[in-house]
Amino acid sequence: MKEKTPEFCCDKLVGRIIEKYKTRDNFASKVPMSIPTLINKLNGTVDFKRKEIFRFCELLDIPLDQIPIFFYERT
């Protein structure tokens, strides 16, 4: 029996991206990351890598102790 992977919600992360960069496209160019890759990560299709999480935090002024709030909130 295959164990179900937990679903995570990145709504707060998307909100911060829009707040700081106005569009996902603007943010993706700063990371740098392709738009499809960014969308897949935000939708939970592809997992974030540790380095990407730290880069996002740097660009979005997210304190490291708030990583769970922005990246791992359960749906």
Image (cartoon, rainbow, N blue to C red):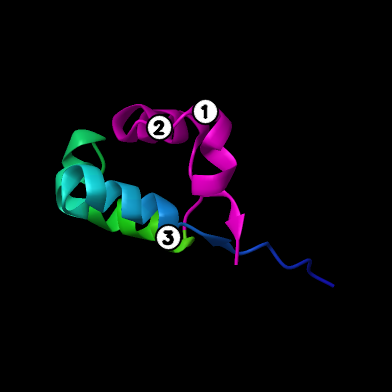
Q: How crowded is mark 2: few (under 14 residues within 10 Å), some or many (20 or more)?
A: some
Residue 23 visible at all: yes
Residue in view at x 19 percent, y 35 percent? 30
Q: Is label 2 in contact with label 1 (beta carbons under 8 Å)?
A: yes
Identify the amino acid type marked 2.
Cys
Front residue (pair 32, 58): 58
Residue in view at x 44 percent, y 28 percent? 54
* SS class, disc 1: helix
Q: Report x, y in % for residue 43.
A: 43, 63
Residue matched to label 2 = 57
Residue matched to label 3 = 11
Residue 34 visible at all: no
Dot label at residue 64: 1
| Residue 38 as seen in the image, left or right of residue 25 | right
- Magenta range is 46-75
N-terminal label among 3 and 2: 3
| Residue 62 as seen in the image, left or right of residue 2 | left
* SS class, disc 3: helix
N-terminal label among 2 and 1: 2
Identify the amino acid type marked 3.
Asp
Q: Is residue 11 magenta?
A: no
- Answer with the quarter of the image where residue 33 lies: top left
